[in-house]
Image: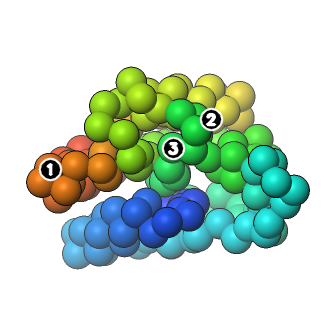
Amino acid sequence: MNIGMIIHSETGHTEYVAERLLKELKDKGYNVSYIKLKTEASAPKEPKKIVDNPSLKEFDTIIFCSHVEAFSLAGAMKAYLKGIEDISTKKVICMITQQFPFPWMGGNNALKQMKALIAQKGGSVISTADVNWGNEQKREGKVTDAIEAITAVV
């Protein structure tokens, strides 16, 4: 099985979780490609522009990893998902990170937006994970829970 992880991270929080997930998947023997979206600055208050649009054709399973930005899915990930090809034959998993302590403070909305954009490309999300970054005492537990939830369905 070929797994593609598409990551957008501004602060490194999403990347931290994605790298932990990558290690776990590779330790389990999966072939995983780790692709960090490249962006460039745009006008103030506009989402960053995607510099490249990595193809998803070679992957059986795709894991999209992004963060919450202003109570929504990060603009760069939105732009990327709008431009992807048909993914109707792929297993799709979504993982987001957020600063606020409760999923209803942006996490739920970001996942809903991801699912809708993926559905427009024929995809169906089989699992999601939401990692709260703001609570240091619970952070590692949330990261572990997200990784376990994702690896269980791959």
In the displayed structure, does residue 135 sit left or right of residue 69? left
Near-viewer residue (66 or 134): 134
The reply to whether discs 2 and 3 touch (Cβ–Cβ < 8 Å) is: no
Q: How many marks?
A: 3
The answer to whether residue 140 is visible is yes
Query: Closer to the N terminus: mark 2 or mark 3?
Result: 3
- Tell me: residue 26, above or below residue 119: below
Tell me which residue sits at (78%, 47%) in the image: 45
Q: Tag 1: residue type?
A: Lys
- Residue identified by numbered label 2: 118
Crowding near the residue tagged with mark 1, few <14, some 14–19, many ≥20 C-alpha atoms within 10 Å: few
Image coordinates of residue 105 in percent, x first then y, are 42, 29
**Mark 3 residue type:** Val
Helix, strand or loop under label 2? helix
The residue beneath circle 3 is: 68
Q: Is residue 85 visible?
A: no
Tell me: 96 left or right of 110.
left
Q: Which mark is residue 138?
A: 1
Specify the farthest residue to the front: 44
